[in-house]
Image (cartoon, helix red, strand yellow):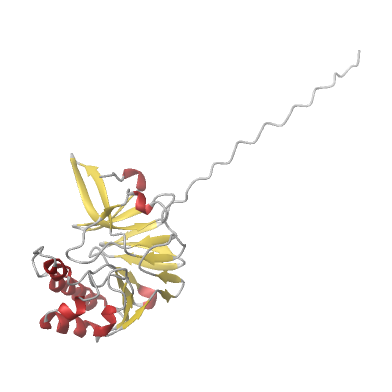
Amino acid sequence: MPLLARSTPKKPAPKPALTLVRAEPVLAIVDRNVEARLAGTMLAALPEGALWIERGRALVVADLHLEKSSSFARGGQMLPPYDTRATLARLAALIDEHEPDIVVSLGDAFHDGGGPARMGEEDREALQALLARADWVWVEGNHEGKAAETLGGVARASLKLGTLDLRHEPTGATNEIAGHLHPCAKVFGRGLSVRRRCFAYDGERMVLPAFGALTGGLNLRDRAFAPVFPNGAFALALGKNGVLPIAPERLLAD
């Protein structure tokens, strides 16, 4: 019998399977805004529903839907005819505050192609005064195409702004900022459910809320967002006191 018994070599323990965890985007609450980074560019989501890009001094809005009430009136549905004036007043206040070098409208600036021709004289003058204060790009939407260009500025199918790709309809591509879907968030708290317009953001792309006074919203849990945000998205909700980040797991369906 050998003095030293040979020990049976132990099999190495199996390595635990790797679990891929979705990296959550880094968000910072600064005053009433939420700051986030996309394609290396810092973005500020404003509580008015616009996006501020400091690097290019760009103010970005989506889905103004100007002259929506006059469009509905043509079909016999009467709405208060003040949506264009209210939307332009909010936009003018943002331009006063931020003094942008460029303003970008991410499509559906008018509710239909005939909107510019139906504008009242006072509203037309107010818009043209805003157009004179900055370079203005109308990204073409599915509602109005190039119609807004008749009032000034330039129309483009899409816009490259540094490392960012700006367009109307989101494709799900990385580094993309889009509109079209009118995102809103629904959450439950303090015994009540609350629904707010919101930015949708997952660290790789962003969809802006509709800016227009008469625009509705589509719940961020709706399946229309799945191709754009396959792993879900944070809602940057427009609250009374500022923008509030809401994690995907807290969002409720309608």
Residue 147 on image: x %, y %: 27, 79
Left or right? Give the position of 79 relative to 167. left
Left or right? Give the position of 37 relative to 106. right
**In the figure, residue 162 lies in which quadrant?**
bottom left
107, 88: nearer the viewer:
107
Q: Quadrant of the N terminus?
A: top right
- Which residue lies at the image location 66% right of the left edge and 33% below the top edge? 14
- Which residue lies at the image location 43% right of the left edge and 70% below the top edge? 165
Residue 7 on image: x %, y %: 81, 22
Q: Quadrant of the C terminus?
A: top left
Does the rendering let one see residue 208? yes
**In the figure, residue 125 lies in which quadrant?**
bottom left
Residue 96 on image: x %, y %: 21, 78
- Which residue lies at the image location 15% right of the left edge and 74% below the top edge? 89
Does the rendering let one see residue 133? no
Q: Is residue 72 above or below residue 5?
A: below
Which residue occupies the extreme front position in the image?
A: 75
**In the figure, residue 111 lies in which quadrant?**
bottom left
- Which residue lies at the image location 31% right of the left edge and 44% below the top edge? 250
Residue 225 on image: x %, y %: 37, 53
